[in-house]
Amino acid sequence: MKNLTALSLKIVEQQLYVLDQTLLPQQQQWLHCTTVPQMVSLIKNLQLRGAPAIGIGAVLLLAYRALQGDSREQLLQDAAVLRAARPTAVNLMNNLDTMLAALAQPDFVAAAVTCAEALFAEDVALCEQLAINGAALVQPGERLLTHCNTGGLATAGVGTALGVIRLAQQQGKAIRLWVDETRPLLQGGRLTAWECEQLGIPYQLICDSMAAMLMARGEVDRIFVGADRIAANGDFANKVGTYSLAVLAHYHQVPFYVVAPRTTIDLACPDGGAIPIEQRAADEVRGVSGAFGQTLWAPAQAAVFNPAFDVTPAKLVTGWVLDSGVYNQQQIAAGVLQQLNY
């Protein structure tokens, strides 16, 4: 297998390494990943996160296991285990389906390696095209807002929504970025802010609850978010809090865009109501943990509701920034996603 390098994943001398995102921004620690249970743990604990990155990590591991001599039957069982690691992010399922086709080939080891390398390269290319398509929407001097983390940490390439923002900055458009902290796990504060500093993107970190005031004051010109699954009718699931932003943007007439590659589209899912929403551990809401340790600010037995994602209906979306182009509500309602034959 070729050496491959992304911000959160890498292959070095046929060995797979994952950057532990739970330790950012204080520590950068690479974990050597060799087994399926280990990968499942990394995904469930958000040490590897971001819908595209999860899908790429899973297929890279299967290719590695094939090179280690695992049988076709074992690899098929492993693929089923990996598929269940996170229920909402459809990139994982889509990439595994592609890998299953490779594993059906007579020389399944070579096919698995070729498949994993191709999916990695595809994600890099898709991210580049997303950035081009989305950055064309950004006007000089605009104040943008984003939620959660959608940069290189979440993909094999430059990212989805943050990739758009990154290119707009590189084009000299003198943008400013509002970064939602993204409760309860603070992916905006820990990860997006860290990436912005690495990239030289001027940003200000805000609590999620501050976005409404900024929009009311006319200090947000455009919003870009990512997605973990886009249904056939354009509804999409993303990190919880995205729906709130969409409602606020609609009320304040702020353009609201979702940015995602083709691997995030699920045509078998008719609408947002059919998207499974992952429920996560109560302690994520009762307090906070990271490289600094753990702190509880609520009673240890407080009852908690903790969905990892929410669903934004298509009627609140200004545009869908895909690798094939930017589409409006009328085009999505007319079935453009089905016509693209993803």
Image (cartoon, rainbow, N blue to C red):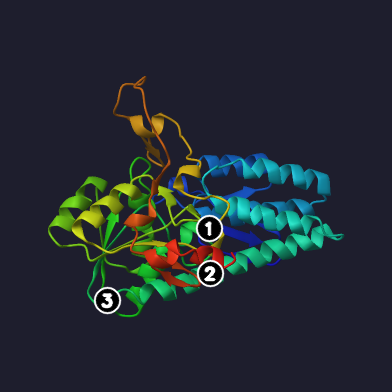
The correct choice, above or below, for 70 with respect to 226 in the image is above
Q: Residue furthest bottom?
A: 171
Q: Which residue is mark 3?
A: 139
Q: Which residue is mark 2?
A: 126
Q: Residue at x 67, y 40 (%)?
A: 81
The C terminus lies in quadrant:
bottom right
- Give how far across and how far down residue 223 sits, in percent: 30, 61
Q: Residue furthest top?
A: 301
Inspect the image, locate mark 3, and give the three-letter code of the amino acid beneath it: Gln
Label 3 and label 2: CA atoms lie apart by 23 Å
The correct choice, above or below, for 39 with respect to 19 in the image is above
Closer to the N terminus: mark 3 or mark 1? 3
Q: Is residue 328 left or right of residue 248?
A: right
**Closest to the observer: 209 or 5?**
209
Task: Specify whether residue 77 is in view.
Answer: yes
Q: Secondary structure at mark 3?
A: loop
Q: Is residue 30 left or right of residue 25?
A: right
Q: Is residue 306 left or right of residue 221?
A: right
Closer to the N terminus: mark 2 or mark 1? 2
Q: Which residue is mark 1?
A: 265
**Closest to the observer: 46 or 223?**
223
Q: Secondary structure at mark 1?
A: strand
Badge 2, how many Cα within 10 Å: few under 14, some, many 20+? Answer: many
- Give how far across and how far down residue 92 sits, in percent: 59, 51
Inspect the image, locate mark 1, and give the three-letter code of the amino acid beneath it: Ile
Badge 3, how many Cα within 10 Å: few under 14, some, many 20+? Answer: some
